[in-house]
Amino acid sequence: ALVGPPGSGKTTTLWCLLRLIEPRRGRVLLGGLDAAGLSSKELREAVGLVPQEAAVFEGSWRLNADPLGEHGDMRVRQALRCVGLPVKSLDEPLGTRGNCKLSNGQKHLLGLARMVLRQPPLLLLDQGCLATDRGTLEAVRSVIAAELPLSTVVATAHEAEALRGFDRIVALRDGEVVDQIAVSAGAG
């Protein structure tokens, strides 16, 4: 997990993992492989992102949870339910871009439901998902533990408290690592 004040380099680090920007020095290894050698398709299959501003598409719950239509209704409902978003109808619209009926916390839970469906080997949570209310934060932690047990999770937050439960916390300031803490399995 990465912690630091705004502008410390947390999101930039995630962008390097996604190859949206290239690191100024060094290289990014994913599963021991140099990310620069991975195709865009391989990278998309390996990495999932719940961004600071969780995207909601104009359309139904089904479209928003499973944009590529890869999963059946039962699996989509299960993913939405496990993140705390039980819906009556998968065909129910979520509203228009400027008039979405979901709170920011619910948008992040929807993004997490997408990841439950995808099961990416590497899951990136950019601070918005962990900067919501305490109930949403606990729901996110619970979903990760129960539904994404095989995913390596890299999360970012402004405050270390939001990162409770992570194995390692790296503190950043001005793009530099200023501290690293390995947390024992029983902590948190």
Image (cartoon, helix red, strand yellow):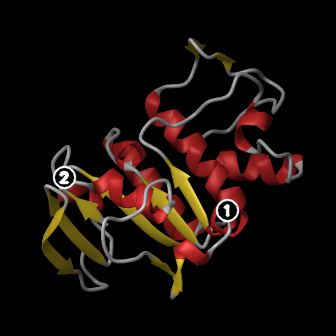
Q: Nearer the viewer, residue 115 or 34?
A: 34
| Quadrant housing the C terminus | bottom left
- Could one spot residue 151 in this view of the protein? no
Residue in the image at 23% along x and 81% along y: 183
Name which residue type carries label 2.
Ser
- For residue 160, above or below residue 101: below
> Residue tagged by mark 1?
40
Taking the image as shown, residue 27 lies to the left or right of residue 45, namely left
Q: CA distance from mark 1 to mark 2?
A: 27 Å
> What residue is at 19 percent from the left and 52 percent from the top?
8
Tag 2, which secondary structure? loop
- Between residue 83 and residue 53, name the one nearer to us: 53
The residue sitting at 47% across, 59% down in the picture is: 124
Measured as percent of width and height from the top left, residue 29 is found at: 46, 80
Q: Is residue 21 left or right of residue 70?
A: left
Can you tell which quarter of the image residue 169 is in?
Answer: bottom left
Q: Is residue 81 above or below residue 88?
A: below
Residue 186 locus on image (x, y percent): 28, 83
Q: Residue at x 78, y 48 (%)?
A: 76
Please name the amino acid that badge 1 sits on. Ser
Tell me: 38 left or right of 164. Answer: right
> In what element is the residue under mark 1?
helix
Q: Which residue is mark 2?
A: 8
